[in-house]
Amino acid sequence: MEKEIYQDLIGRSFQRGAKGPDYFDCWGVAQEIARRRGFIIPDEDSPEGIQLKIAVISGLNTFYTEFIPQPEEGAVVVFKPGSTLTEWHLGTLLSDKRTFIHAGGLSVNILKKSVRIEQLSNFPWHFRIFGYLKLCKKMLQ
């Protein structure tokens, strides 16, 4: 994925439920990058978004996404960072398939919650990967 697609998002502030342009949460970053690539991820709190979340945590494919066995560029990586169903986390894989862009996460340090790039192999991400989602639903041109 070309840097131009996401570079301007780096450093934007984290705010739960935010979809940009100044503040983002993990869903908002994944949604914005998908939009820039011509794909659709529904709003998190819309009926479609709620159905998507339920399907993802159940390990099911949907109209918008399908699980893939290996990481690939542009896929959404799903993390299960905690023990409750409300702590799921998303990132978008970059072209090297070893780094991802996201916002929020486990840190209590607000600066570490801004939109940033991290390594999948870093603690705690590498052992919290739930799966990889290929985006399927293209935007109408």
Image (cartoon, rainbow, N blue to C red):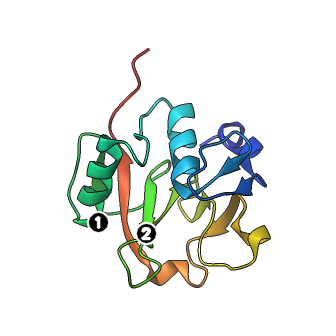
Q: Residue at x 38, y 29 (%)?
A: 138
**Label 2 – label 1 distance at C-alpha:** 8 Å
Residue at the far top: name it: 141
Marked residue nearer the N-terminal end (2 or 1):
1
76 vs 136: above or below:
below
How many circles with numbers are drawn on the protein? 2
86 vs 24: above or below:
below
**Label 2–label 1 contact, CB within 8 A:** yes
Q: Residue at x 39, y 18 (%)?
A: 140
| Quadrant housing residue 47 | top left
Is 77 left or right of 108, judged from the image as shown?
Answer: left
Q: Residue at x 39, y 85 (%)?
A: 83
Q: Which residue is mark 1?
A: 57
Q: Nearer the viewer, residue 51 or 39?
A: 51
Residue count near mark 1 (Cα–Cα under 10 Å), binned few <14, some 14–19, many ≥20: some
Instruction: Residue 68: tell me if it is visible.
Output: no
Q: Amino acid at mark 1?
A: Ile
Give the percent coordinates (x, y) of residue 131. 35, 66
Is 16 left or right of 22, judged from the image as shown?
Answer: left
Q: Residue at x 22, y 65 (%)?
A: 58
Q: Amino acid at mark 2?
A: Trp
Q: Which residue is mark 2?
A: 88
Q: Nearer the viewer, residue 45 or 112?
A: 45
Q: Nearer the viewer, residue 18 or 56?
A: 18
Give the percent coordinates (x, y) of residue 73. 50, 50
Give the percent coordinates (x, y) of residue 31. 51, 43
In the image, which disc is placed on residue 92? none
